[in-house]
Image (cartoon, rainbow, N blue to C red):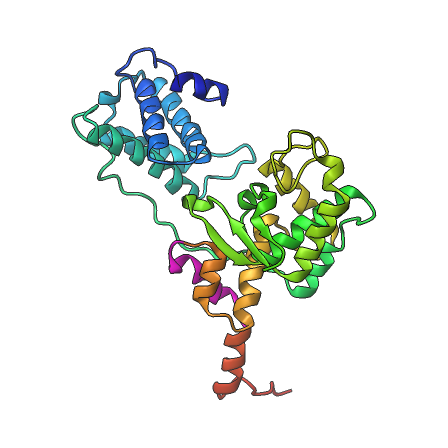
Amino acid sequence: MARRKDQKKGLAPFEGSDDPRSLGALIFRYFDWMRIKGYSEATITRAWEVLGTFLRWCAERAVIQARDVTKPMLERYQRHLYHYRKRNGEPLSFRGQHSQLCVIQGLFRFLAKQNYILYNPASDLELPKVGRRLPRFVLTAAEVDQVLNQADINTDKGIRDRAMMEVLYSTGIRRSELINLRLFDIDDERGILTIREGKGRKDRMIPIGERALAWVRKYLDDVRPSLMIEPDDMVLFLTVEGEALGQSHLTKLVRTYIKASGIGKTGSCHLFRHTMATLMLEGGADIRFIQQMLGHAELTSTEVYTQVSLKKLKEIYLATHPGAKLQRKA
């Protein structure tokens, strides 16, 4: 039954998976375990992509059985990822390599604990170090308005797009969280937005600004009724076909508006998330409130914005450093 479900979602059986002890077959047992433990389908799909690539690499070396995978083999695969080049000629980032190897570690940890293999060959695998990178771009409040004004509010699509971008900027929610919003997730009277099953399948309630609410109300009154197709599944933002937006669709849409604004910065949905957090911090918000807004499990994930927000640092620098205001001599 699980196999049929995976095939419907495009997760076709791997080569050699007819053998119940093969690596391909055991991976589907891993997927079943992930579902039982509450992992999202998006996480499972990502694991399928990573493990499918790994299995093809193993098959090229005639390694089909899980028991035949060794630590030296995994180290060779790690070197393969390091030297791999994408279609555009660029290498995988260390973060990307780290992410793929973590998926492989998770698989073999499961196989060893369930006694499908005698030992875990990935237990002592040394992963590449991943630094905490700063966001490449952050918008000013004026630049945000410039981007938002690109939406043609004389059209249904423009009103919908303006409402979506207003919500992204006002709340800093993730792309996936926006497209999963339902009508009952917005409390207009209290100015509260409820995120259900965000990252880590955690719910949270956060405030949403009045301007964003006003655009959502306009979308709901003037646009959504013409897009909605019965039976209504209560998805807040709909495509012209009356369906929920896909993540790639939303990414391309927002990226187009940012490019059209002419501000000279690139990005998409996450750019609004970075901007909201940085502007709140510069406005004096406690970092723990920003953590709650963003839905970060660890404060360390939010602390990156203390390095992005240079406004207060510069104010303190000018006020305290004796050489900060020295004039250059002609």
Position of 114 compared to 155: left or right?
left
User: What residue range appears in magenta?
Assistant: 297-310
Q: Position of residue 242 (x, y in %)?
A: 69, 32
Quadrant location of the C terminus? bottom right
**Vertical order, 99 against 188 (above or below):** above
Position of 46 compared to 175: left or right?
left
For the point 66% across and 61% down, the residue is 210
**Vertical order, 310 against 62 (above or below):** below
In-front residue for pair 14/71: 14
Q: Position of residue 327 (x, y in %)?
A: 60, 87
Position of 60 compared to 70: left or right?
right
Q: Position of residue 207 (x, y in %)?
A: 55, 60
Quadrant location of the N terminus? top left
For the point 26% across and 18% down, the residue is 65
Residue 276 visible: yes
Position of 134 compared to 248: left or right?
left
